[in-house]
């Protein structure tokens, strides 16, 4: 495929989830993403220990010791270079890379990029066009810069936990680390915007985002409702939409489903296809405002109807007419034949599993999803990258002996 970022090189000092998730999109779009990881260190017994992205050690499932399946989720299509950025020799390697790269990215704690020479101030003399992209927990320019932070903390502080779950229940986080994922996505939007400008101006810059800012920004219209009208969005039964009705979960004969009449026309179509003209004619349900005011009564009436048939019946009756979806378990969602039909499930060859199952990119270019390869083993590309930078075999051996790589 002719991928849109072919020919661009991104150096990323990254770990765990948010940053690697974002840069994986760049790698899947054809960029050469070189993942900088701390090298292993000799233990008291002389054996190498640790090193690498902390995600490599996240269980419970491993392809080999120190190589987790979790790590594959965020690092497809990348190259791995082990490099100690705290050493003068490590900085020399970094600068050689920067000379022939377009982006330096990181998702470190806010105070670390400047200390490790990863910001524009440190690199502009090496490459004036370099874009330095930063993803931190709380930002680099405030008193929280040194604070570590994770997705779940942001869900708590940004109000997500108090908005999630059934009314009257304990606060709940979302089932997935969605703050990590949206922040990684925003990170790459900013990175790509700065890269476009650097390509036409010849001048790079710093571009920043942080987990808490991204989490708060995602509060979107409820934020504006509160800030402008004092209307604080509350939990609703069955994960119902705060204003549109019926737009919530209902129980079919064999499980739950989600029905969404976001627009007035969908309510009319629902009643028509269910053969319930009486509901459409009921003055309690004449408008969305009426339905919202009488949501409990409407829920009881629809429950009595939906429970008469299994989900497959309602899916066939409503799909393509009224927005509807089954409430699947994770396993059922991933085993859904639809994923195969649209090419969202993929397989890559890993040294320890020649048939490693992965999710393909949600993007398509010219109607095709970009190709994938397995995430790299720790330091798998170190020798090749250093040779490309002009280091000979003797020098590479010296860097390895000193612990720089």
Image: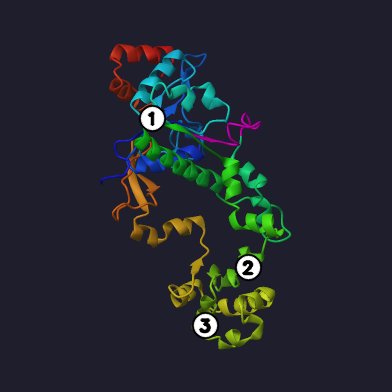
- Image point (54%, 21%), residue name: 115
Give the x, y percent position of residue 366: 28, 54
* Residue in front for this viewpoint, 324 or 215: 215
* Residue in front for this viewpoint, 214 or 19: 214
Q: Which colour scheme is used?
A: rainbow
Element under disc 3? helix
Give the x, y percent position of residue 130: 40, 30
Q: Mark 3 points at which residue?
A: 274
**Labelled disc at residue 243:** 2
Q: Could you tell me how many numbered marks the image carries?
A: 3
Q: Nearer the viewer, mark 1 or mark 3?
A: 1
Which residue appears farthest toward the left when viewing the image? 1
Q: Mark 1 points at which residue?
A: 129
Q: Residues within 10 Å of mark 3 (few under 14, many from 20)?
A: some
Give the x, y percent position of residue 379: 38, 26
Q: Which of marks 1 and 2 is in front?
A: 1
Q: In this image, 263 relative to 2: left or right?
A: right
Element under disc 1? loop
Task: Answer whether residue 262 is magenta in the image.
Answer: no
Element under disc 2? loop
Can residue 69 be seen?
A: no
Q: In this image, 308 relative to 233: left or right?
A: left
* Residue in front for this viewpoint, 291 or 402: 291
Which residues fall within the magenta stretch? 133-148
């Amino acid at each position: 495929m002719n991928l849109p970022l072919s020919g661009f090189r991104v150096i990323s000092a990254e770990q765990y989830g948010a940053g690697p998730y974002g840069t994986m999109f760049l790698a899947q779009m054809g960029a050469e993403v070189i993942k900088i990881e701390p090298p292993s260190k000799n233990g008291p017994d002389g054996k190498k220990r640790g090193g690498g992205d902390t995600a490599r050690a996240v269980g419970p499932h491993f392809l080999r010791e120190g190589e987790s399946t979790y790590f594959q989720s965020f690092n497809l299509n990348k190259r791995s270079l082990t490099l100690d950025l705290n050493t003068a020799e490590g900085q020399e390697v970094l600068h050689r890379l920067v000379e022939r790269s377009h982006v330096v990215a990181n998702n470190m704690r806010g105070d670390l990029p400047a200390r490790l020479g990863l910001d524009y101030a440190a690199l502009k003399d090496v490459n004036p066009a370099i874009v330095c992209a930063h993803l931190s927990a709380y930002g680099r320019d405030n008193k929280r810069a040194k604070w570590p932070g994770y997705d779940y903390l942001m869900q708590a502080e940004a109000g997500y936990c108090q908005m999630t779950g059934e009314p009257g229940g304990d606060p709940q986080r979302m089932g997935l680390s969605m703050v990590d994922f949206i922040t990684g996505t925003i990170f790459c939007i900013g990175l790509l915007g700065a890269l476009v400008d650097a390509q036409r101006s010849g001048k790079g810059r710093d571009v920043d985002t942080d987990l808490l800012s991204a989490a708060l920004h995602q509060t979107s219209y409820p934020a504006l409702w509160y800030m402008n009208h004092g209307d604080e969005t509350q939990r609703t039964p069955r994960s119902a939409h705060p204003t549109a009705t019926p737009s919530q979960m209902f129980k079919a004969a064999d499980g739950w489903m989600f029905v969404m009449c976001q627009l007035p026309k969908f309510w009319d179509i629902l009643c028509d296809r269910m053969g319930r003209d009486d509901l459409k004619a009921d003055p309690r349900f004449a408008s969305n405002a009426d339905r919202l005011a009488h949501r409990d009564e409407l829920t009881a009436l629809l429950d009595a109807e939906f429970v008469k048939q299994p989900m497959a019946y309602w899916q066939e009756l409503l799909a393509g007419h009224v927005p509807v979806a089954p409430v699947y378990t994770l396993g059922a969602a991933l085993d859904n034949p639809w994923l195969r039909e649209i090419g969202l499930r993929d397989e890559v060859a890993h040294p320890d599993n020649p048939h490693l199952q992965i999710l393909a990119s949600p993007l398509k270019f010219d109607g095709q999803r970009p190709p994938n390869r397995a995430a790299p083993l720790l330091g798998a590309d170190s020798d090749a990258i250093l040779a490309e930078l002009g280091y000979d075999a003797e020098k590479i051996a010296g860097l390895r002996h000193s612990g720089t790589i």
